[in-house]
Amino acid sequence: MKRPLGAQISHMLKDRGVDVIFGIPGVHNQEMYRGIEEAGITHVLARHEQGAGFMADGYARASGQPGVAYVITGPGLCNIMTPMGQAYSDSVPMLVISSCLDETAAKRGQLHQMKDQRGAAATVCDWSEEARSAKAAYTLIDRAFMEFGAQRARPKHLQVPIAQLVARAEVPTQWHPAPSTDATNKMTVTRLPSAIAPPVPLDMVDMIALRLLHAERPLFVFGGGARGAVYPDGPIPSILARVNAATLTTYAGRGVVSPDWDLSFGAALARPDSAAILDASDCVVLIGTDMAEVDIWRETAGHRPGAIHINIDPEVLAAAHPSDICLQYDASDVLSKLHSALEKHGENVKQPSKSAWSADIVAGYRSRWRAEVEVERPGIITVCDALREAVPSDTMIYSDMTQLAYTAKEVWDMDRPGHWHHPSGFGTLGYATPAAIGGAVARKGQPTMAIIGDYGFHYTMAELGVAVELGLPLPIILWDNAKLGEIEDSMTRAQIAPNAVVARNPDFCKLAEAFGAHTAAPKTLTDMQDAVRDAFTADGPTLIYLTPSIS
C-alpha cells in the first residue's frame, strides 16, 4: 500500500535487516519517523547528532551490520559529519539519511539552509547523493547496502527533499537475500570473500608459500582487514607454526594473532625500532593493513622492497614500493589457500635448519618497549594490567583519545580480534561513550566497556543519559589527569611553553549521578577491579572515576 516516502524508507530498511536506528527527530525529518515503530525498528534517541553518529559507528563495529542514523537538514547533518569522517577513516559501514530543502538556489533565508548540504557531506564519506524521487531513494539505499558487502566498508549519505518525504510512494521491492551462513540470514551480513574480490589464483598462493618456506626470517603484519580470517580452527596459527613466522599487528589488528604465539611482537609498529625488525625480515607479508601514518608514525615502515601486500583496496596497493608484490584479494581467501599450499609444498622444500627468530629475541624487544612506555607515561601500565584482569575475556572495548588508551593499546594483548575500537585516523575526541552505547545495544547480554579521558568526556557527556534510559550495564572508565596531558607533553617536546591545556572540570561523579548513573571513585587498584566487576552486572551505566594517584 502507498505510504509517505519517509515511512516507506523505514519499512525498506527493516526488510534489509535494520533493527536499530540512531538519531534525533526534527520538523524537517519527522516523516522519516512515521514508519519506524510500524516497521518494528527500535529508535535510540541521542542527545546530539554527533552522539547518534558515534552510536551508529559503535553498533556497526559490534554487530558487523551497517549502523543507520536519521538526522535533520543543515545543522543535524553538520553535527554528524565528524562521526562520518571517523567511520570513513576506520572503514565502518554507516548509512546516514537526512532531509534536505526542496529548493536552495532561488530561495534564501529558510530554516536550516546550507549552500551545499550534499557537497558538505561528500567531504567525509564514500558518497553523498540526493534522491529526488521514491525510486531514486530506493535505488540508492540498495546501492549502499550492496556496496557495504561488496567493497571496503565506508559511510554513505542519502538526503531526501522534504516534499518527497511527505509524498505518498509505492512499496519498495522486497529483498530476498541469498542463503547465508549467519544465523540471522540478513543480507547485511552476507559478506562472502567472492563478493569483495575474485578468488585468489592458486599460482599466486603457491608463490607466497614457497617464499615463506625458503625464508629465514618470515614476518607477517596483520591489520584490521585480516580479522575475518580468525575463527575456530582458522588457518593463521597453523601458518605461523609451519614457517616459524614472527608477527606484528596494527592497533586494529590486535587479536588476529593469539597472545600465546611466542613470536608475536604485538601491536608495536609505532615503536621506532620496529623498522629494524621489518628490515631484518627476508619475507614480509602485509595483510589487511594500510600501513598508514597512524599505524607506524614515521615516513616509511622499514621493510625491504619485495614485500607481499594483500588488500582489497587498490588505493592502498598503489602506494606500495614498485618492487613489492600487490594482490587485491580478500585476506580470508588468501590465508585459507595459503594453509593448504604450505602443506602441499612443505615436504618438498628444504627449509632453513633454524629460524633466525626466537622467543628470546621477541621477548627482549617487548620488554624494552614496555619499559619505554612506562617512561613515557609513568604509572599507567599498572592501571592497564589491573583493568585487564577485571574485565571478562569477551568484553568489547571502545576507547577515546586519552593516555590511558594510548598505553593500553601497546601493552594490552587481545585474545580475539574486533574487540577493541579506537578512533584512529580522524582521531576525534568524545568517541568512546556514545560508541560504547551503540556497541552495547548491538551486544545485549554481552560485556561492553568505554575508556575515555576527562577532556574527551566533555564532548559527548550528554549521551550518558541515553545509557541510563536504556539501562545498559556499561562501565565507563574516566581517566582524569586534569589536563590535555598528551598535548602538554607534545608541547614540551617541541619546546613550546604549555598553554591552553588545562580546563576546569566538574565533579564528574556528581554529574553522572545527576543523569541517574551509578558512580565509583576507587583509590586503589583492587577497589577499581571490584567496581568494574560490579558495573558489568549493574542495572545501568557506571562512571568509574580514576586519577593518576590511584595505587
Image (cartoon, rainbow, N blue to C red):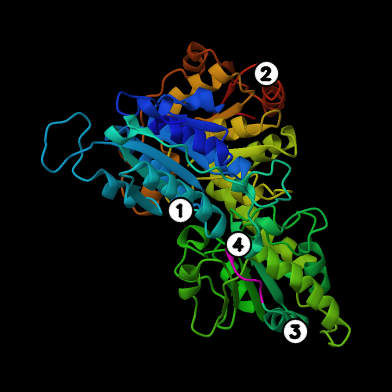
- Mark 4 sits on what residue? 195
Residue placed most toward the observer, 447 or 403: 447
For residue 89, the mark is 1
Mark 3 surroundings within 10 Å by alpha-carbon count, few (fewer than 14), some (14 through 19), many (20 or more): some
- Mark 2 sits on what residue? 538
* Whether residue 139 is situated above or below residue 312 in the rendered picture: above
The kind of secondary structure the magenta stretch mainly shows is loop
Tag 1–tag 4 contact (CB < 8 Å): no
User: Callout 1, which amino acid?
Assistant: Ser
Residue range corresponding to the magenta coloring: 196-200
Front: mark 2 or 1: 1
Question: What residue appears at the point 34 percent right and 33 percent down from the top-left corner?
Answer: 165
Q: Quick one: SS at disc 2?
A: loop
Mark 1 surroundings within 10 Å by alpha-carbon count, few (fewer than 14), some (14 through 19), many (20 or more): some
Residue placed most toward the observer, 472 or 549: 472
In three-dimensional space, the C-alpha distance between marks 2 and 1, rounded to whole angstroms, equals: 34 Å
Q: Residue furthest front?
A: 1
Mark 2 surroundings within 10 Å by alpha-carbon count, few (fewer than 14), some (14 through 19), many (20 or more): some
Of labels 2 and 4, earlier in sequence is 4
User: Callout 3, which amino acid?
Assistant: Leu
Q: Quick one: SS at disc 3?
A: helix
Of labels 1 and 4, earlier in sequence is 1
Q: Position of residue 235 (x, y in %)?
A: 78, 64
Tag 3–tag 2 contact (CB < 8 Å): no
Question: What residue appears at the point 57 percent right and 54 percent down from the top-left corner?
Answer: 149
For residue 210, the mark is 3
In three-dimensional space, the C-alpha distance between marks 3 and 2, rounded to whole angstroms, equals: 54 Å
User: Callout 2, which amino acid?
Assistant: Ala
| Residue 263 found in image quarter | bottom right
